[in-house]
Structures are given as C-alpha cells and as structure tokens.
Amino acid sequence: MSLEKKELSTNSCRYWLHTLIFFAIMICVSHIQPPQPLTPLGMKVIGIFLGVLYAWIFIDIIWPSIAGLLAMGILGVMKPVELLNKSFGDPIVVMMLFIFIFCAAISHYGLSRFIALWFISRRFVQGRPWIFTYTFLAAVMLLGGLTSGTPAVLIGWSLFYGVCEICGYKKGDGYPTMMIFGVVFAAQFGMSIIPFKSVPLAIIGAYEKISHTSIDYAAYMIMALVGGFVLLGAFILVGRFLFRPDMEKLRALDISRLAADSSLTLDKVQKLALFFLFALLGLMLAPSFLPSDFFLTRCIKSIGYTGICMLIVMCMRCIRIDGKSMLPVKTMIDKGVSWEIIFLLAFVFPISGPMSDPASGITSFFMLLLDPLFGQNSQILFAVTLGLFAACLTQFINNSALGAALMPLIYSYCTANNFPPETSVILVVMGVHLWRS
C-alpha cells in the first residue's frame, strides 16, 4: 500500500472513531444518573452539548450541529416545531445571513482597500514613523471589524509591501518582520470590535438567549475599541523599546505616493456602497443614543436589528446600475456566507434555553463549581480568567463554538452574584480572536 493510501486510510479510521465517540458521548452522558443539583433534563442537555462540542473540535461543524438538533427532539429536550423556530427561524440566525451578504458586497466593491488607504494617507503621519505605524495598524484593525480577518490581513500586507518598496526595506529587516505579525494581530483583534459581525454576534447571541436580556451594542463597541487602541499602543511600545527596528527609512516616506494610483477616488457605485455601510452602522447604534420615544428609535425597534440588515440588503438589491442590480444576491451568498457559523448558531440558540432553565439544574451546578474558585466578589478576576482561558483554548476549538460554550458560565456566575455580564462577555469575545493571531 502506498504512503498516500495509508494516510487516507488512517484519516478515514480517525474520522469514524471520532464519529463513534461523538455519538457515545451524547447517548451515554444523557443517561447517566444526575448528581445534585442536576436533573435528568440537565444530563440530556449536557450530553448533547458536550457531544456536539467534541464533534466541532475533531470532525465538522455542520452535520454534528444537525445531529445535535435531532438529538434534542429524540431525547425530548424540545418539541420539533419549537426546535425549528428557535434554530433556523431565530432572528439572529437570519440576521447573520444578511450580514454575510452585506459584508461580501462591501468587499466586492473594493471599499476595504479605500478605507485602509484613507487612514494611512493622512498628513499628520508624515515624517512620524511610530505614529504612521500606529495609524496603519489601527486602520487594519478597523478594516478587520468592517470586513473580516483574512481580507484585512491581505490588504494590510499588500499596502505594507508597497510602503517597504517605497522606503527601501528588504526582506528580513526588523521593521517589516515586526509589522507582518502586527498586521495579523490587528486584523484578528479587529474582528471582535463590531458586535453584529459573525463571531461576536454568535457569542453575544448565545448569552442573550440564555439570559433573556440584551447587550448594548454601543457600549460593547466603545469598550472593544478602547481595548483595541490600548493593545495597539502596547504593541507599539514593545516595538519601540524592545525590538527597536530601524525607522529612519520610514521617516522619509512620501505619503502621497501611497495613493498615486487614484485608490482614494471612489466611483458612484462605491460611494453608494459606502453610504450603505454608514447607514447600517448608524441604524444599528442609533437606539443606544436616541431618546426611546423618538420616531426613528421606535421604527428601528419595531423591525429589530435583523430588520435593519434586511432593509439595507433590500435597498441595495432594488437599486439598478447600468441595468444590473447593485447587489447580486447569489454571487454574494456564494462568496460571503459562512454556513458553518449559520449551523453552529442554529444549534446553540435552541439548546441555550434548557441550559438556563431551573428545571435542568445546570445553572446551580455551575455555581457549585465556580464559587470555590472565584467567591462572590471577584468579578474582574472571573472576567480576566475567562478571557485568558478562551484565548488559550481557541488554539484547539472553533472560536465561535468556544465562546458560545462559555456563556452559560458567565450567565450563572453573573446572575448569582448580581454582576453586569458585559465585561466578561467582551473579554471572551476578544480572547477567542486575540490568541488566534
């Protein structure tokens, strides 16, 4: 047998072994005699969740999520109609689909490069290499928030290679080496600053389903942005005083040469796409700033965040430019929709309800575990520990799955001790992005 065939055979055996373990966890744990304060319902929920979590790590996201949903119906955790309404029919799952379509359109029209170039071509960075570096990384971070990590990294590297060529930096020089890592760090962290992007929305949505409360998007963004700018500042300080690369070549950089190819000139379609980007951000954040009885606030609340995304996509779809729709939906779905996230959310949301149900005893069980570790007056210690824990484990577990799995812990601890959950939720979201860089 050839080496290639042996490898295929080994991978196949490993796949079926993990599949067997996945089903064994779901079935066996669900039928264990529950220790107090857990109930038989709680053991079924824990068995299904642990089994699917194992499968997410070692097998796949999509079909184990479907298997988990079916197990919830078979084991009597939830009735079929309710299960479907709370999975694929959940407003946040629908919202995620439209967000994916919208972000694909933003990338399709080339706004990502424009946004990055606009920031780094400001005159105040001319002749100030460390301010330029900070601004460059901040632009990449914001780009990661508005699009996603991979395009932000690729655009950041592309722009930075142009800077190196203009300044005369060569491969292996200290400054380019530092910035290659800095761009990835900034882009990955940037994905956590927008609360209605894929991974933050999955984690925040899981908490909201468990707690039956909502996280203020504006407050989240403010805290995440402040945290991001502080971390970038720390990165700059480490570079300046520890790595100390040669910055003299950058000091002579002519900023105007970065946009010499008219990259900062938008055509009419790009201007329209940029308008819709600001419209989406503005409408999403408006309820946090406008009076509750204001007409616009009432309209936004009547359709919800999901309705806002649907409205923006609908407007872009109905606008025709040169006889074609501004938003080709099929193309954007093919390019932009991450079905793994959709199916992950479709499983997490319905199982979140039984997890927080007193009838399952899971919340009380978590408190028995957490109280000896953190006591009742250690909110900051708990939040930081959970954030670091998430940062370490995200090397081995899908970051959305990991973040969602930690939400019952946050809900149990913060509810029992009457602590606001926002700090813990935000640190977990940051953690599952930060270490992956």
Image: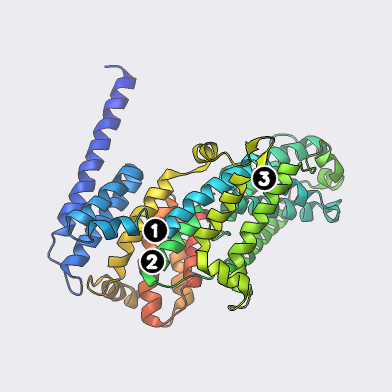
* Marks 2 and 3, how far apart at CA: 33 Å
Give the SS element for disc 2. Answer: helix
- Left or right, residue 396 beside residue 33: right
Residue 218: quarter of image: bottom right
373, 366: nearer the viewer: 366
Residue 386: quarter of image: bottom left
Label 1 crowd bin: few (<14), some (14–19), many (20+), radius 10 Å: some
Instruction: Identify residue type, mark 3.
Output: Ser
Give the SS element for disc 3. Answer: helix
The residue that disc 1 covers is 90
Label 3 crowd bin: few (<14), some (14–19), many (20+), radius 10 Å: many
**12 vs 111: above or below:** above
Q: Are marks 1 and 2 in contact (CB under 8 Å)?
A: yes
Instruction: Identify residue type, mark 1.
Output: Asp
Identified at 65% across, 53% down, the residue is 277
The residue that disc 3 covers is 112
Sequence order check, earlier mark of 3 and 1: 1
Which label number is shown at residue 209? 2
* Marks 3 and 1, how far apart at CA: 30 Å
Sequence order check, earlier mark of 1 and 2: 1
Q: Residue furthest toward the top?
A: 1
Label 2 crowd bin: few (<14), some (14–19), many (20+), radius 10 Å: many
Query: Could you tell me residue 280's position as x and y percent?
Result: 61, 57
Query: Could you tell me residue 111's position as x and y percent?
Result: 69, 45
Q: Are marks 2 and 3 in contact (CB under 8 Å)?
A: no
Query: Could you tell me residue 214's position as x and y percent?
Result: 47, 71
Identified at 56% across, 55% down, the residue is 311
Camera-near label (3 vs 1) is 1
The answer to whether any part of residue 345 appears in the image is: yes
Identified at 51% across, 50% down, the residue is 98
